[in-house]
């Protein structure tokens, strides 16, 4: 049994190294010039002037002067991606969490957008790193991340000290794509 496991592990390592070496081979024409990753606490392209101007210029060059077809988020110093969202008319900062099934709001953020949390019934539990906690579900009319708008988004107030609200799959799954390359997340 141990021999089979070690053999399988060796095959996986060999394939991974082969894929990595093929992926790293490129000519200088194939390599896109990227700006240095943005540093700082929770910085993303919506709050960083240079990245925002580059993205808007790219959208304009494509002939898309209205709402952007994509949003670029830079990796923050804590390795996460953050988005500044307009939720039902209020500005909320969220951490992008593809493992969260819904947009999960802290009590403070939910109250900031006008939700009376105490009047919402507890409708289930959320499985968090700290264990199962009560949650109260509802639907947001709209969530917009710098021009990318999604309507009728499932959300929940999680009765736990999360520290930051989460932009989960109820928003992300309605987008055309979510892609991470290096220190940049592209929402389309």
Image (cartoon, helix red, strand yellow):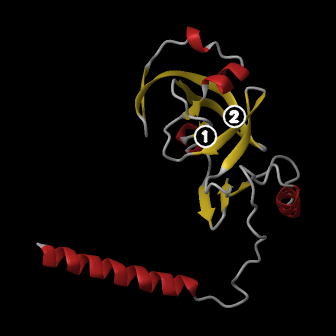
Q: CA distance from mark 1 to mark 2?
A: 10 Å
Give whichever of 91, 77 is nearer the camera: 77
Of mark 1 and mark 2, the one earlier in the sequence is 2
Identify the residue at image location x=62%, y=51%: 176
Image location (x, y in percent) of residue 80? 61, 53
Give me the disc on residue 167. 1
Q: Position of residue 130 (x, y in %)?
A: 43, 36
Residue at disc 1, secondary structure = strand
Q: Is residue 54 above or below residue 132?
A: below
Residue 39 falls left or right of residue 4: right
Q: Decide: is 25 above or below 58.
A: below
In the image, 152 versus 97, the foreground residue is 97
Residue extending farthest top: 119
For residue 68, the mark is: none
The residue sitting at the bottom extreme is 27
The residue at 78%/27% (across/down) is: 89
Name the residue tied to disc 2.
143
Q: Is residue 30 left or right of residue 167?
A: right
Quadrant that contains the N terminus? bottom left
Secondary structure category for the residue under label 2: strand
Marks 2 and 1: in contact by CB < 8 Å? Answer: yes
Image location (x, y in percent) of residue 174: 59, 43
Answer with the quarter of the image where residue 6 lies: bottom left
Pick the residue in front: 113 or 39. 39
Are there few (<14), some (14-19), or many (20+) residues within 10 Å of tag 2?
many
- Percent position (x, y) of residue 24? 57, 84
């Amino acid at each position: 049994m141990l021999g089979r496991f070690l053999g399988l592990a060796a095959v996986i390592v060999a394939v991974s190294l082969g894929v990595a070496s093929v992926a790293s081979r490129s000519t200088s024409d194939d390599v896109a010039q990227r700006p240095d990753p943005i540093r700082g606490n929770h910085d993303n392209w919506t709050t960083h002037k240079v990245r925002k101007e580059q993205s808007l210029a790219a959208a304009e060059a494509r002939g898309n002067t209205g709402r952007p077809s994509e949003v670029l988020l830079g990796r923050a110093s804590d390795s996460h991606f953050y988005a500044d969202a307009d939720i039902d008319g209020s500005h909320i900062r969220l951490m992008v969490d593809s493992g969260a099934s819904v947009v999960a709001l802290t009590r403070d953020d939910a109250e900031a957008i006008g939700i009376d949390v105490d009047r919402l019934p507890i409708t289930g539990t959320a499985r968090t790193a700290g264990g199962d906690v009560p949650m109260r579900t509802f639907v947001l009319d709209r969530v917009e991340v710098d021009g990318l708008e999604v309507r009728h988004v499932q959300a929940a107030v999680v009765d736990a000290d999360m520290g930051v609200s989460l932009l989960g799959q109820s928003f992300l799954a309605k987008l055309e794509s979510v892609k991470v390359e290096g220190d940049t997340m592209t929402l389309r």
